[in-house]
Image (tube, coloured by chain):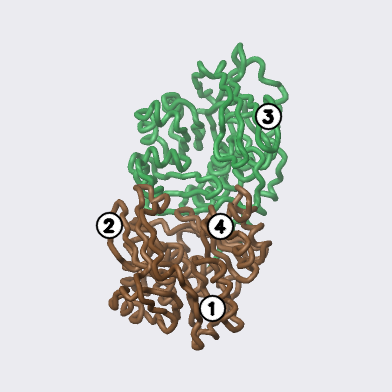
Chain colours: A brown, B green
Amino acid sequence: METLVVGSVGLDTITTPQGTREDVIGGSASHFAMSASRFSPVKMVAVVGSDFPESAMDTFRKNQIDLTGLQVKEGRTFRWSGYYNIDFHKAHTRDTQLNVFSEFQPVIPQACKESEYIFLGNIDPVLQIEVLQQVNNPKLVVGDTMNFWIESKRQDVLELLKRVDVMLLNDQEARDLGESHDLVKAGRKVLEMGPKSLVIKKGEHGAMLFLGDEIFTAPAYPYSTVVDPTGAGDSFAGGFLGHLARTNDPTPRNFRQAVIYGSIMGSLNIEDFSIYRIEGMSPEEVQQRYEQFKSITLFD
Amino acid sequence: METLVVGSVGLDTITTPQGTREDVIGGSASHFAMSASRFSPVKMVAVVGSDFPESAMDTFRKNQIDLTGLQVKEGRTFRWSGYYNIDFHKAHTRDTQLNVFSEFQPVIPQACKESEYIFLGNIDPVLQIEVLQQVNNPKLVVGDTMNFWIESKRQDVLELLKRVDVMLLNDQEARDLGESHDLVKAGRKVLEMGPKSLVIKKGEHGAMLFLGDEIFTAPAYPYSTVVDPTGAGDSFAGGFLGHLARTNDPTPRNFRQAVIYGSIMGSLNIEDFSIYRIEGMSPEEVQQRYEQFKSITLFD
């Protein structure tokens, strides 16, 4: 099955201890789409400015990403500039220019309304909810958010939680939303707020899936060298939902495997700037990492 | 097979959000011994003062812990007092009284010199090395240390690393010793310093085993409610080495399972103050948690 993503597409200028890249493809929808398209076709709803390079459009199109829902508005594309220190602990923002993204109104084209697998990338929760009002009976909705929205629009985030099947949070967001230092207790509390499932992404410490009463834990892939972590969470989401759409069979077992595929795509994402590593990867690499995940977790 | 532990035995006064306990059994040798004795007999080498309660001695003896090597010196027992905040992030020391522990000279009794499985609890690395000079050809030596020694006696810790088979470190200690923010790179660097194997304990994020080129990752047991984390690392060591001594077959598979048993014993340790939870546990609980570890990590 195909996935539908609504989120941001931008041009990033990023400095890490490994170097600097200017005006490279960024944004939650871009990273998700490039990652999910490794598993099944993607339809993207987002907005860019008239300055968005045709070469970037081509990159998307070449990767089975349908751009029918991509609005091109007069003006400049969303831009983010930031840097990471040697520990890659957090992204430090130098500059954010919302540009055409500030007026983004997601419009789901007729051809996308029947999408069964939907990813609501990290945008204003009010817009995320509006997206859900435009689609017909999706099979699985995955939502993402960030601390900014949890702090500034908590009520809307809580409303969103009631409407998604799976919520993706990082550990800090889970602690904030679940109001507990204990990540498991926080996760369970978030689950009580509505979603059937929750995935907590813990960076170098892996990820944790809550599905009903079940808990599943996955380590981070240990063999990556970090070049640029930007977009790792969205690439994780792409692997996660991509696998579920590909199998079209949301069993607990496939949810667990989806977390592994998410971790694999996150691990690939961080090995180069922007979308480069995932653009250049082979399907065999994913399967090889999947086998490695088995070998690093098996004990019985 | 039996295990031999050399470390501290003390009386702890601990305050956590769950309450306060005064003068309860503490110290690395105590926590290790109580945990390892669930798997195989333990011989303990340590020192206490003449004020050390007979009831505590009885607790050890009742748990197949041989006290031939426990020195009782005129004076007061080692005492530590500390507290944890709501996030249990770190132990805050209120007061440390070394007392008779300040002059501790480990003497390995004749009856312990043939021990094949040895745990060097967190004491001065110079003393840890002296212990190894007193034993005959052990099969497996596991060493522990702490930031205090890494900072104040780095050369001696490096010397220790050449003489142990397995080193146990927490994540911060691994980063300090391995001089990398990347835990995997830090771990590999520590491995190059001598030990055949390294276990990095990451608290709520589980543990990581490096064994030659192999990496194995284990999550933390997710169902515990923290009451008092003091001694969790030593209880981990007890489960780890206890399992290896019990099986007496140090294959990579048993090393992996040893990490799981270590995690189980750490998870039990934190559920009550001092050694209480491990003292009161049943063997069935360990096996039950072992099965739960399988269920939270299996995906294929």
Task: Give the x, y percent position of residue B1.
Answer: 56, 40
Q: What element carries label 2?
A: strand
Name above or below for residue B257 compared with residue A69: above
Dots 4 and 3: beta carbons under 8 Å? Answer: no
Dots 3 and 1: beta carbons under 8 Å? Answer: no
Q: Mark 1 lies on which chain?
A: A
Of callouts 4 and 2, which one flags the residue occurring earlier in the amino acid sequence?
2
Dots 2 and 1: beta carbons under 8 Å? Answer: no
Q: Residue A152 carries which label?
A: 4
Q: What element carries label 4?
A: helix
Q: Which residue is drawn at 65% across and 43% down?
A: B226
Q: How crowded is mark 1: few (under 14 residues within 10 Å), some or many (20 or more)?
A: many
Q: Residues within 10 Å of mark 3 (few under 14, many from 20)?
A: few
**Circles 4 and 2 on the same chain:** yes
**Residue at the bottom extreme?**
A111
Q: Is residue B20 left or right of residue A29?
A: right
Q: Residue B61 carries which label?
A: 3
Name above or below for residue B38 compared with residue A186: above
Most foreground residue, B65 or B138: B65
Mark nearest the camera among 3 and 2 is 2
Mark nearest the camera among 2 and 1 is 2
Dots 4 and 2: beta carbons under 8 Å? Answer: no
- Please name the amino acid that badge 1 sits on: Tyr
Mark nearest the camera among 4 and 1 is 4
- Please name the amino acid that badge 3 sits on: Arg
Q: Residue at x 33, y 43 (%)?
A: B192
- Residue at mark 2: A20
Mark nearest the camera among 4 and 3 is 4
Cα–Cα span, label 2 and label 1: 35 Å
**Circles 2 and 1 on the same chain:** yes
